Image (spheres, grey):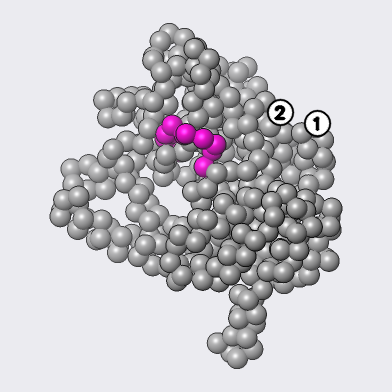
Amino acid sequence: MTGRLAGLLFFLAVIVTGLILVSVIDREPPETRLGLDERSFSSLAGWDDDDQSAALDAFRLSCERLMTLPDERSLGGRGMAGTVADWRPACRAVGDVRTADRDAARAYFQTWFRPVAVSNGDDDIGLFTGYYTPVLKGSLRRSEAYPVPIYPLPADYLKVDLGDFRADLAGQGIIGRIENGRLAPARTRAEIEAGALDGAAKPILWLADPIDAFFLHIQGSGRIRLDDGSVLGVGVAGTNGHAYVSIGRRLVARGALEKGKVTAQAIRAWLKDNPDEARSLMQENPRYVFFGILDGEPIGAQGVTLTARRSLAVDTRWIALGVPVWLDTRVADTSAAPDRIRRLMVAQDTGGAIIGIVRGDVYWGAGGEAGDVAGRMNVAGRYHLLLPRALLRRRAREQSSGR
């Protein structure tokens, strides 16, 4: 990195730190207020019926990630989950729990954690959706049959993580591209689809259908089946940093879809039935996702492999990654899932559409059945976080002493 660029980044981080903080605060409605209320495990309906060993395996992965970080590092979520040091004892102990032992897994979580109900002010109900890994046909070469490019992260794109400069801004950042020695706004979806990246980034593969590509961007990972029968995994390598715009909400505003009945299936059907308007509607979402080839399963924002039905995407401005989450919601009754979901999950991912204190996106796995459930999930629910007992005791002492 040149001295000029290093200086630019330092100056930018100092100046933009204030700007980003203002923009985050400005876009929160006045009533947005994180509420945390400590509860008991006996208050969690369905707790004794869940197989927590499935979540334990996912939590082990989060612990492996956390144990590589310095003690003083905040987990994020505005400090609600403390620091890495607060989690080390529980993460060390998880190695002693036998895999697939339901009773041992339940006992582990009850020993090391306490449930904390989450609310936005006095409202503990929020929106829960689903996502999955689609399986699509593609090619390593452009052709008439495969004209839609999937791009890697351009070399001139840069993300400034403001949490590296101020702990209270963990999870906040800005993305742009280097142009003539300055950081310029990244290209929008419309600009990229008009050829803005031609010659600047070589596609890693090509798809047949622009609607498939659009939904791949929303899901964040995919498996691409090539003509020779081999399969490539792809996952998010970065984004252009633009805010996510829901085209489902745009369709409701147009009167094309009914509020409360917006599903991925309904959106896809409208796009297929209205080809003359589909491209311009998709471009109303300026956010664009860049991909890389994966060696294995999809990786979430925490940097760990996602676990089907146990990994949850959250709004990291409020909820810290790596935290176990007791989810209580519903989903359409299919062979892939019961109507009522009461299960322990782990916050391991995030997404452009996941905005709010009580807001989650359930990862359902790969393939058509997972996609059917994920696409139809658009329901109300609530959740509790599982926070270390020692952290909660320390905070209680600090509050009683007036600190």
Residue 125, given in percent of the width and then of the height, sits at: 73, 56
Crowding at mark 1 (Cα within 10 Å: few <14, some 14-19, many 20+): few
Give the secondary structure at mark 1. loop
Say left or right for 386 vs 245. Answer: right
203 versus 355 height, above or below? above
Q: Are marks 2 and 1 in contact (CB under 8 Å)?
A: yes
- What is the number of the mark on residue 151? none
Would residue 65 be found to the left or right of residue 59 on screen? left
Instruction: Read off the residue under disc 1.
Output: 335
Picture coordinates of residue 251, whole percent (x, y): 62, 32
- Residue count near mark 2 (Cα–Cα under 10 Å), binned few <14, some 14–19, many ≥20: some
Q: Nearer the viewer, residue 93 or 52?
A: 93
Q: Nearer the viewer, residue 237 or 17?
A: 237
Q: Which percent across, then down, holds residue 1?
A: 20, 50
Q: Is residue 319 above or below residue 211?
A: below
Q: Which residues are magenta?
A: 287-299
Residue shown at the point (57%, 52%) measured from the top left: 61
Picture residue at 72% right of the left edge, 72% below the top:
38
